[in-house]
Amino acid sequence: MPKGPKGQKRPADVIGNAVRVMQIATGEIAEDSPEPGKEYARKGGLKGGPARAAKLNAEQRHEIAKKGARSRWSQAEGQSASVALTVSTSRKARKRSPKSRSRKD
């Protein structure tokens, strides 16, 4: 089911969405409000990253960045080989000989 910008559930189809809007407008159902705990946690998360970066010196930040890059690239190594193989074989399959490129009469 699709989610709105604040994580609220929405109907997947147009008619279901129109019915929901009508129910909210007439007061049959109340509009969903975000949970207060989630907003509180989000505010803390927005503060945490910059505060951590301010505490670290340049060398420590560099080591953390290297560790993250190693982790990302180690996951991508297994995937990149299969993607490269697929691309190379598909290009070979589409390659035409000089005779097939001759004039069309």
Image: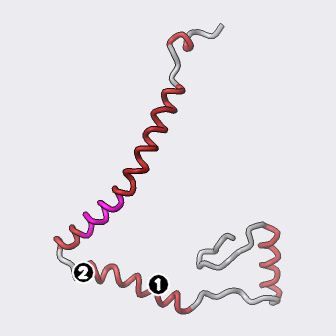
Residue at numbered disc 2: 54
Taking depth in this image into account, of 101 and 69 the one nearest to the observer is 69
Q: Secondary structure at mark 2?
A: helix
Residue at numbered disc 1: 42
Residue 2 appears left or right of 81: right
Q: Sort mark 2 into few (<14), some (14-19) or many (20+) by Cα contacts within 10 Å.
A: few
Q: Is residue 102 above or below residue 58?
A: above
Amino acid under label 2? Ala
Q: Which residues are magenta?
A: 64-72
As drawn, the residue found furthest toward the top would be 105
Q: Residue at x 82, y 69 (%)?
A: 15
Q: Quadrant of residue 47?
A: bottom left
Taking depth in this image into account, of 69 and 16 the one nearest to the observer is 69
Q: Residue at x 48, y 90 (%)?
A: 40
Majority secondary structure in the magenta region: helix
Taking depth in this image into account, of 87 and 56 the one nearest to the observer is 87
